[in-house]
Amino acid sequence: MYSMCTLYAIYIKQQIKNHQRRLTHPRGEADQLHKCIAAASSARGVFDGNVKVEREAQQTDARQLSRNLLLVPKVSVLVYM
């Protein structure tokens, strides 16, 4: 079983994105891609991406990637994976 999740975000003020996935298939594959553009000096972003692998899915292959484009000074995007 394969799943792909792509998240796009534009931060123009203080925002928090919290994304969680649960994998239960024994031999599952999952890709998670987060792309963000921070476009204002007051923008502060937090992306919290979690992949929870259940006990019966221990042969799961999961990947995460986060790409952020900061367009102005003093802007920040924190990424927790």
Image (cartoon, grey):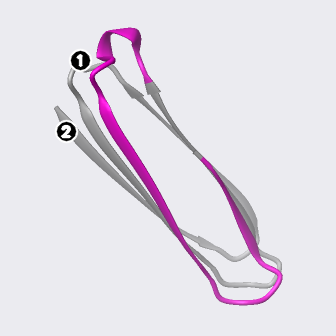
The percent position of residue 68, horizontal first and vertical second, equals 56, 73
The secondary structure type at the circle numbered 1 is loop
Q: Nearer the viewer, residue 12 or 35?
A: 35
Residue drawn at the location 29% of the way across and 27% of the way down: 60
The residue furthest top is 56
Queried whether the magenta region covers residue 61, the answer comes back as yes
Q: Earlier in the sequence, mark 2 or mark 1?
A: 2
Q: On residue 2, which mark appears? A: 2
Q: Which residues are magenta?
A: 53-80
Vertical position of residue 11 compared to residue 6: above or below: below
Using the rendered view, name the quadrant where residue 13 is placed.
Answer: bottom right
Q: Nearer the viewer, residue 9 or 69?
A: 69
Residue drawn at the location 25% of the way across and 41% of the way down: 3
The residue furthest left is 1
Label 1 sits on residue: 26
Q: Is residue 69 left or right of residue 16?
A: left
The percent position of residue 63, horizontal first and vertical second, equals 37, 46
Q: CA distance from mark 2 to mark 1?
A: 11 Å
Q: Neighbour class for label 2 at 10 Å: few (<14), some, many (≥20)?
A: few
Vertical position of residue 7 compared to residue 20: above or below: below
What amino acid is at disc 1?
Answer: Pro
